[in-house]
Every structure is written in structure tokens, then in C-alpha cells.
Image (cartoon, grey):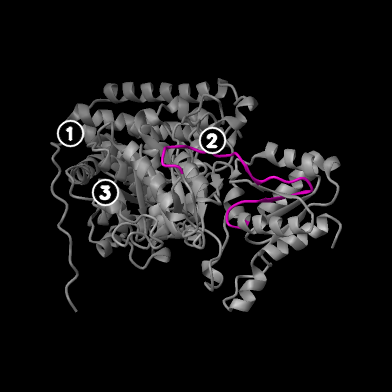
Amino acid sequence: MPNIAMREALRQAMVEEMRRDPTVFLMGEEVAQYDGAYKVSQGMLEEFGPDRVVDTPIAENGFAGLGVGAAMAGMRPIIEFMTFNFSLVAFDQVINSAAKVYQMSGGQYACPIVFRGANGHAENLAAQHSTSVDSLYAHFPGLKVVSPATPYDAKGLLKSAIRDNNPVIFLESELMYGWKGEVPAEEYLIPIGKADLKRDGDDLTLISWGKPVHHCLKAAEELAKEGISAQVLDLRSLRPLDHDAIFNAVAKTHRVVVVQEGHLFAGVAAEISARIMESCFDLLDAPVVRVTNRDVPQPYATNLEKLVVIDPARVVEAAHRVMGRA
Amino acid sequence: MPDLPVPPPLPESPLPPLDKAGLLTLWEKMLLIRRVEEMAAKAYTERKILGFCHLYIGQESVAVGAAAACRPEDRWVTGYREHGQAIAKGVSPRAMMAELFGKATGTTKGLGGSMHIFDKSVHFMGGYGIVGAQCALGTGVAWSLKHLKTDAVCLCWFGDGAANQGAFFEAMCLAQLYKLPIVFVCENNFYAMGTAIDRQSALTDMSLRGLGVGMVREQFEGFDVEQVRQRMSAAIEYARAGNGPVILEVVTYRHRGHSMSDPAKYRKPGELEEKKKSDPVHLTEARLRDLGAGDAELEAIRDRVEIAAKDAYEFADASPIPDPADLYNYTYAPSGS
């Protein structure tokens, strides 16, 4: 099986879908001539031409709204935010237009659009280029929110997102674009809303999505050396959320750590722990523990940045707490 | 300093002027909008219509003149003062009134209400409640109309208040850059909610905003429905021919407050009375009489409109409320493969 980088898996998904459906187009800043700020769309202009791989001015609210209108009128736009930090400029169009128009129009106008781009922190980018938007977008009914952790999942989920008749927020990561993984040559789709058990285990479950899944896998290795068997559940989608997978994991291990990039307050990790508490409190042997970024805007200096972001050691520490070994 | 590169003026309209029969049709439509909205105002005071209700009374010639210049397949995207535009575009007064009443038979099954009238069957693509945001949506609609190789044009409506929003400016930048088939129609009704035009913008002809992106522009008075039809047609056919977008400012005036809860105390003394002299419904009636329309002919139309407006009210009143079992059925569109 070919071993390819995340950016290539994402590109394969877009290219295959654009070959399959002439109404799909990619639009965003630097996606065409520049080949994408992170080279995700490299070579696509050459194959599809400037009507389908479209450079925009720096006008996120404008081109996000353009995408929504184009989706309502019969096309399937993929809108790339160079990073999701800039999507905050377009928040109105994503929330007030894309997420709501199907309902407000009484089901007359669907909005089949993908908003994709880099989410969360990279390295030394400071406060305004390091935001994790997972919890912001997951808050709103009408949106689907997807956050893959591997090239395999990224490709299969992006293809499903492009075919979906609803707006999909597709969260990638600058740090992960170069990470490699096995991706089959033949076509496949991964359904939105299905979690994936990335590592099996008996003593506790580490629940995560996106980049921190890898911290969880490393933490599970460390824990195994201590004789603690941790399983890693990758949610892959936040909306819809795979409740069954979460509750089955609680029923099996009775101890849970939720690992979420971004801030602690009112985050998706809080939502997951509340749902576990509401639905399967009696199955828990310990309170759910959350691991998130520290509750400050991202600092620039390397030493401070490392204090803020999640690493495997913090996941291990949280695992010790739910195991009663802290 | 170099001269500002001024885009060419809008060409003359390709349409011949309307005859009496044609003008009667437009007058009837204007009258229908007025009477339906007066009925809505009554229903609002009866608490049969709730929430926000922004009336279009005084501006009817703009929507009706525009509709007379459009083809049925042209798309309209607009703001929340859209009852008049909806009826002009062909939305049934019954379904629209039922929507205002929050009924299952409404245009959006009671989900949208006054600010979100949609009717796909006549390509009325929505009233939107975030001022200016619809300009970007309309630009996207025009994107698809162009790239799906249709001949249709998008008419994108907004008010003078929206012309200060960034979304409007970004939409103009994109529409001009990509040469999209869209006509931006700014209805300048002199007030952004309660703030008079000269208190909210240093430049009070909003079509001049188009010059900054090189867009063909024009400002004209919108009280005469024939004048609106002619200038709209010039703009729409210019865009349809692939020349790119146009921005129009249509000078109009709203007779009612911003919404039903606004007594409009911000108007100058005597201003409303003065403006009512150019009431578009009355102006067109006078023009029809000049063209030889008699009392009997006009009364017959008035009677027909009265029946239609009452029928809309009664239909809405008698309609069932939405089924609670439907609540979760419109959050996500069904997806196939």
C-alpha cells in the first residue's frame, strides 16, 4: 500500500472528486498559482484550470459567502481557509448562512460545501495563528465537523465531505501535512460520524481527534510499559458525534481521559464528559479527566509554547489520575 | 494624481415603454403588495404575526419594476424587508402570509418567518437577517449561474444601511474580479433603521461605492415603476451579456417605521407627508388615468386585489400550525453517497 503524506491524501481526495463531479471546485487564498500555502493543492490548477481552482483576494468573509451562495445554486465548493484562524473573519457566513439556510428555507436550499484548512497551533506562530476552532464550530446544529488524524482517514473523510449535502468543517493541521501513512490506491470512502479505535486496550480509554490522537498513541505506549492497557478512540467527527463508540468504550474500560486541542472552557471535551456523565455515570470507576491546551492565548516563545500545548507526558499524567495512581 | 478610471455608463434599456395594459399589470402588483402588507400590519396588531415584521410600503415600484425587467429564471437574493420583493417575484401571497403567521402552509413551513421568505419554484432565494451578508451569497449564486453555463442573472438586494458593511464591499470586489452576472440593487430608503442616510454615510449615493472596484454604476429615482423597469432592464441585460456586474442605487422611501415596533420619530416634521406626494402606487394610478384608464377599470383591479389580500389573510389564519414532529427534520439535508 502506498505510504503518502497527509497533504497528498487530501489532494487525492479533491482531485478524485473533481474528476467525478464537474460541479466541485476549489477556492481560496493561494490555492491555484501558488499551489496552496501548504502545497495541498499542488498541481491542481494545471489539471482543472482557473475556473475550478480559484485564487481569491484576501476576503475570507466574501469568498466564504460566495461559496455558500454557489452551493445553494447547484455547485459543490471546497473553500480553503489558509488557516482556520482566518475563518473567524468569515464566521458570520459559516454560522448564519451555511449552517442555517437549509432550515430557514424550509428544506428548499441545501448547502453542500466544505470549508477546509489548517486548524490549531503549529510552531511559534503566537496567538492569532494558533487557534483551535473545533469547539466553536461543533456548537452549531446544521454543520458537520470532521477532524482526521491520519492520511487514510483524511482522504476517505474528505471525499465523503465533498459528497455530503451539508456544510462540513474539515479540520486539518499544519504540523500534520507532512506526516505519512498508508493509503490504498483504490477508491474508498469513510462515513462521517463514525469513530475509529486506533488502539485497543482494557484499563482506560483515551478519547481524542485530530493531531492529539498521536499524543494519545504515544502515551498509550508509555502506559503499556507500566502495565496499564490504554485504548485510543479517535472520534474523527465531532458532529455528528459517535455516541455509541464513546459509550461502548466507557462500558469496556470504565475510565476515560478526553484529550482536546484548544481551550478547556466550554470545549468539546466538556461536552463529551457531560454526555458520559448523563448517559453512563454508573459505568464509571473514576471521574472523566480532560487534557487541553492551557487557558491562555498561545505565546510565541518556544518554552512557553511547550507549556501550553498538549504532549504525551500530560496525557500519561491524566491517565495516572483516572487510574488512581497520581 | 491620475484620474479615477471611470467605468462606462450603463447603456439604454432594450425594452420599449409599457402600454396601458402593461402598466395596469404592474399597478395591480404594486397594489397587491401594499394591501397584503397592510393586512400584515393589521395581523401584527392582532398578535397573529409575531417577532420582527419590516414593511415595504412606499417602495413597491422598485420590486415590481425590477420583476418586470427580469426573466423567471433570474435569481433574487435579499435582506429582511422582502415581502414586496417576494410577491413581485411570484411568491404566492397566501404562502407568504401563512409564513408570517407561523403556519405549516407558509413558504418555509413556519421555520423562517417574515425575514426568511424562500420559494425555490420562483427562484426567490431568500431574505436574510444579517445586514449585508446577502451580498456575498448573491455573488456566489451568480458564480454558479455563470459556471453552470446558464443565461440567468442574480439580482442582489440590500438597503442603504448594508452599504457600510464589509461583506458588501468584499462581494463587490469578488463579483467584479470574476465578472459575474449579478446586479447589486441598493434601495436607498433614507434610513438605516433609525439613522438617516447623511448621518450614516459621508457619501449618500451608495452606487458610487462601485467605482472603487471599477463597477458600472447608476443612481436613479425609483418612484416611477416604468423608470425602474427601464433602468433595471439595462443593468440586468448588461450583466446577462457577460459584461460583469452592475451596481444600482434606487432612491426610494419607506412610509412605515423600520419594523412594526418603530414609531419613526426620527423623521423631520412634514417629511413623510412630503414624500407621500411621490407614493409610487398613486403616481402610477395618475399615469394610468393619463393613458385613458377609467374608474371602472381601476376599481375592478382594486376589488380583485382586495379579494386576494383578504384571501391571503384568511388562508393564513385558517392554516394549521407546524407539526412538532417536524422540528428536527430540517437541520440537515439528506445525503446520499
Q: Is residue A299 above or below residue A44?
A: below
Query: Which residue occupies 42% across, 37% down?
Result: A187
Confirm whether the magenta stretch covers residue A188: yes
Q: Which residues are magenta?
A: A184-212
A293 and A87: which is toward the camera: A293
Q: How many marks?
A: 3
Query: Which residue occupies 13% across, 47% down?
Result: B12
For the residues labelled 1 and 2, the Cα–Cα distance comes to 46 Å
* Dominant secondary structure, magenta: loop
Give the mark toward the camera: 1 or 3: 3
Q: Is residue B243 visible?
A: yes
Q: Disc 1 on helix, strand or loop?
A: loop
Residue bearing mark 1: B18
Q: Amino acid at mark 2?
A: Tyr
Residue bearing mark 3: A47
Question: Residues at marks 2 and 3, common chain?
Answer: no
Crowding at dot 3, Cα within 10 Å, few <14 / some 14-19 / many 20+, comes out as few
- Host chain of mark 1: B
Q: Position of residue B165 (x, y in %)?
A: 42, 59
Q: Position of residue B147 (x, y in %)?
A: 27, 42
Residue bearing mark 2: B332
- Host chain of mark 2: B
A140 and A307: which is toward the camera: A307
Q: Identify the disc placed on residue B234.
A: none
For the residues labelled 1 and 3, the Cα–Cα distance comes to 50 Å
Q: Amino acid at mark 3?
A: Glu
For the residues labelled 2 and 3, the Cα–Cα distance comes to 33 Å
